[in-house]
Amino acid sequence: MPVLKLALRNLLGAGLRSWLNIFILSVSFVIIIGCQGLYKGMGQQMERHSIDSYFGGGQYWQVNYDPFDVLTLDDAQGRVPPVLQKMIDEGKALPLLKRQATLYPRNRVLNITLNGIQLDQTVLDIPTALLRDADAAIPALIGDAMAKSTGLRQGDTVVLRWRDAHGTYDAEEIYIAAVLNTPVGEIDGGQVWIPLDRMQKMTGLPGAATLIVVARGGNPQPLGGEAGQDWVLKDLAFLLADTRGMMASQYVEGGVMYAVFLFLAMLGIFDTQILAIYRRVKEMGTLLALGTTKSDLVWIFTLEGTLHSVLAAALAFVYGTPLLLWFARVGFVLGDSYDQLGFALGKAIYPIYTPGIVAGTTVFIIALTALVSYLPCRRIAKLTPTEALRGKIT
Amino acid sequence: MTIIRIENLTRSYQMGSTTLNALDNVSLTFATGEFSGLIGPSGSGKTTLLNIIGSLDLPTSGSAEVLGKKIETLTPRQAAALRNYEIGFIFQTFNLLPVYTIYENIEFPLLLQKQLKPPQRRAMVKQALEWVGLADRAASLPKQLSGGQCQRVAIARAIVKKPRLVLADEPTANLDAQNSANIMEIMLRLNQELNTTFIFSTHDEKVIRHLRRKIKLADGRVVGGESI
């Protein structure tokens, strides 16, 4: 305790110099926790939006389905096997039928993916009920990014051309029943949603689907037998791999920023430690004369440097808590460009500060400060008591 | 009873290609309760000898046995323990810890003695403050005291643990005549009351006239006074 008291008194006794370091370090605390919370919130938002609007609790893909190869899309349909049909009938799964098609908005030609979806489904957060009342033409939903790129609005009609299962092309006007406000690129860009039964009829594929979305919270297992050969389980780990990979790269980018902040803060601590050691050599000599050992001195000065980060954590807690909580409430507002980049984020990112982020950041910064504080103190081990009492250090 | 035995002690420093003998073949003994001083001009080796007796420095050759312990054989930890338990230091520039109050400065050596309980420490600090007449300034910081008062605090810090030996290096060099007299009076009283051995390093006449034994040093050698 005398060591702690002495270290604390010396630290506070240095006045403005200490408080400047403490403040800079506290800013690092707040920024790092804030950014980590932002990334955490960003990752969770992207996952949640993707799960709610498209991935559900996992998907069964018809074996030929490859989302990155639209040319094979027309071969990627199959009859729903009984085991999955039972889940669909119980409302625990949702069939989606996908085909290539062409849209002609404003005399332009646009290749799209036509999606068939049940009207009374509750598996995905897509307002399919809006398709129910449009009898005159084929009712369709499109996302707001799609609406923006095609110039289509709610109530517009547009010509759709498709090819049925026998290879025959057909065309008809579809009616834009609603424009979805969604941040999820998989259901927006180049996607048109129409009722599943109409699409099965139009394409001559009754009872067919391209993929089956399992309801959220479900625990899908790989299918056995023949069904297992035709329908392949894609669990959430697979479906979210791209999102998580992107977040991992974001963390790395964030790490560079943390490193810069911490480097500046640690430079201040290091300089202060060097200065303290050179200015207080006589004090060290006195402490040695009073019976402290050199290792005690190293401990005192290391502790003194480390206390910068402890006080910085306390200061960061005082002003950072309300600031970060406010930030978590209002969120980080994004521009429209984020939707078009394919980030399933929505209009704002809401940071999430987990105990792990706060405790991890605090422990890491304190440990780093202790290390940076210790490095200059190694010089104390070379101190000669008699020279120290004369104010000299070799 | 002999508490310090110095035999053929030499302390050399290498200054480039030249070897400088700060102490040259010094032999001395000190007995319990002495009030003695090493006197001589600057560079005569007074402080070097005091530092070796205080286990702050090591002899180049020869032997220094202090309170039954050979200084040259002590580990740094043993030397620190010897200083903490048995030896009090008083410095020319007081060397108080500026961020500690007077009470805390005096208490500090006791805090290093882990076996002392807080009530014991409090009683010892209170007694030391009374010895030097600063009981009413316990809560002050060193910067709020005069030079004479600071040196009294340094004396209290040196004797609070009731050491068997106090080493005072030019204790009055920074004080005026009145304060010097007060300081010497306090140390003489403590020497008599506690039977603590005091060894001074000084060339100040105001100190020298109070010494009961004077050892003259010049160029690292004992040149007068009472040596063995």
Image: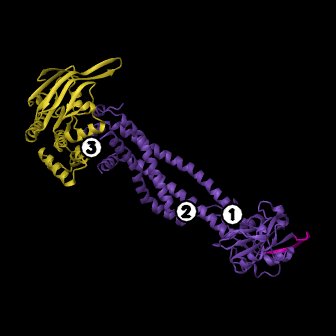
* Residue under numbered circle 2: A351
Residue A333, quarter of the rendered image? bottom right
> Numbered disc 3: what chain?
B
Label 1 vs 2, first from the N-terminus = 1
Task: Give the residue number, with chain letter if any, for mark 3.
Answer: B98
Palette colour of chain B: yellow
Say whether mark 2 and mark 3 are on the same chain.
Answer: no
Badge 2 marks a residue whose secondary structure is loop
Q: Mark 3 or 1, which is nearer the eye?
A: 1
| Magenta-colored stretch includes residue A143 | no
Disc 1 marks a residue whose amino acid type is: Leu
Chain identifier of the residue bearing label 1 in the image: A
Q: Kindly identify the amino acid type of the residue bearing the numbered disc 2.
A: Pro
Residue farthest along the front direction in this orientation:
A225
On screen, A319 above or below B148?
below
Number of other residues with Cα within 10 Å of mark 1, as a class: few under 14, some 14 to 19, many 20 or more: some
Q: Residue at x 17, y 36 (%)?
A: B166
- The magenta region covers A163-176
What's the CA distance linking mark 3 and mark 1? 64 Å
Q: Which mark is residue A239?
A: 1
Q: Give percent across and percent down for residue A282.
A: 29, 36
Q: Is residue A167 magenta?
A: yes
Image quadrant assignment for residue A112: bottom right
